[in-house]
Image (cartoon, rainbow, N blue to C red):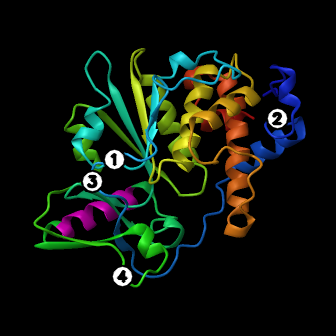
Amino acid sequence: IPLSRGGSASDLEPAYAQLTPEAYRHAVTKFKQALTTPERPTGEPVFLYDRTPGELENFRSSDSFILPHHLNQKGWDTLHISGSASIASLEQVQRLHPTPESPVVVLDVREESHAIVGGYPCTWRLGNNWANVGKSRNAVIADEQSRIAALKQQPTVEIIHRKDAKHGLENPRKVVLKNPDISSEEDLVKSTGAGYLRLMVTDHMGPRSEDIDLFLAMERALPEHGRVHIHCGVGQGRTGIFIAMHDMLKNAHHVSFHDLIERQLAFNPGRALDFNKDVTHEGRANLRNDRLEFISLFYEYAKQNPKGAPRSWSEWLADA
């Protein structure tokens, strides 16, 4: 598979440059193998609420976002993509206006088990949000379904705010709900008429090959007027990565890597796509570097397989 060399002179800037031939070969070799999975933290996951009902944190839509004039506009109007933090209500999905003529697929990229309890988006958490790290897709689904079933047997459910728990506050914000409505996100989303796809992406990491292939199958099946709404927990890291992947599938053949990353940085909150961000102090620098190396390689895939065709990610890697 040849390395793409097209694009503007700005591609040569070190921050957002395409892979050199040597870096390309290194990335292909790396991603042909399953990346090392972090060690799962010990202990039982704690059930926490992510935010108060009604909030749709970090929501953005390409249809309403005006790119700054100095950024490459090519193909932006074809994206029809939105992103946010976790979804918790019918109203949040209905604002996307799913219809048979303009269908919406909600892409949930959270590996961690989660549920909606009395309108609160809730998550079973361990350190680094790695309560399900290393589990198979079926094991994650079984874990979540089992936990939701157990919750439904409780007359009251107590939940604590995730930020207060993370910071170890002595008197964290706490909510006690009596006989609340409890559902999985899938059930809630499908009740609005929208489609739903769950990917098991570990927080702070890039996606696994099996999840990339599922994502590509969704992209191929999306009708011309279809829209995608992507979310993780906070709506920054994993969400931003998949929004960039969507842009690449549609536009990598005529937008340089540098220009595409520049406009994605303008669109997405957080700095998941900022190649200059230093996270050494967080102890996750290697994971971040792996994820950025992945997105650089995915650009090469997308340039050769517009809209995810003809080959899947796994097939393309196997031939590299």
For the residue pair 73 and 107, the one nearer the viewer reads as: 73
Q: Secondary structure at mark 1?
A: loop
Q: Nearer the viewer, mark 3 or mark 4?
A: 4
How far, Cα to Cα, is label 1 from label 3?
10 Å
Q: Mark 1 or mark 2, which has the lower sequence index?
A: 2
Q: Tell me which residue sits at (65%, 62%) in the image.
A: 36
- Contact (CB < 8 A) between labels 2 and 3? no
Amino acid type of disc 4? Asn
Counting residues from the N terminus, which is met first, the one under dot 1 or under dot 3?
3
Which comes sooner in the sequence, label 1 or label 4?
1
Residue 304 visible in rendering: yes
Residue drawn at (60%, 55%) of the image: 205
**Of helix, strand and loop, which one carries label 4?**
loop
Residue 283 appears in view? no
Q: Which residue is mark 4?
A: 171
Q: Is residue 263 left or right of residue 186?
A: right
Give the quadrant of the C terminus: top right
Check whether the beta carbons of the residues at disc 3 and disc 4 lie within 8 A of each other.
no
Q: Is residue 169 magenta?
A: no
Classify residue 282 as left or right of residue 99. Answer: right
Alpha carbons under labels 2 and 4: distance apart: 48 Å
Query: Marks 2 and 3, Cα distance to the nearest angstrom?
Result: 41 Å
Q: Which residues are magenta?
A: 138-151
Location of the N terminus by quadrant is top right
- Indicate left or right for 114 with 317 as reference: left
Q: Which residue is mark 1?
A: 87
What residue would you read off at disc 3? 53
Which residue: 33% across, 49% down? 55
Of callouts 2 and 3, the N-terminal one: 2
Q: For the residue carrying disc 3, how many other residues have a C-alpha within 10 Å: few (<14), some (14-19), or many (20+)?
A: some
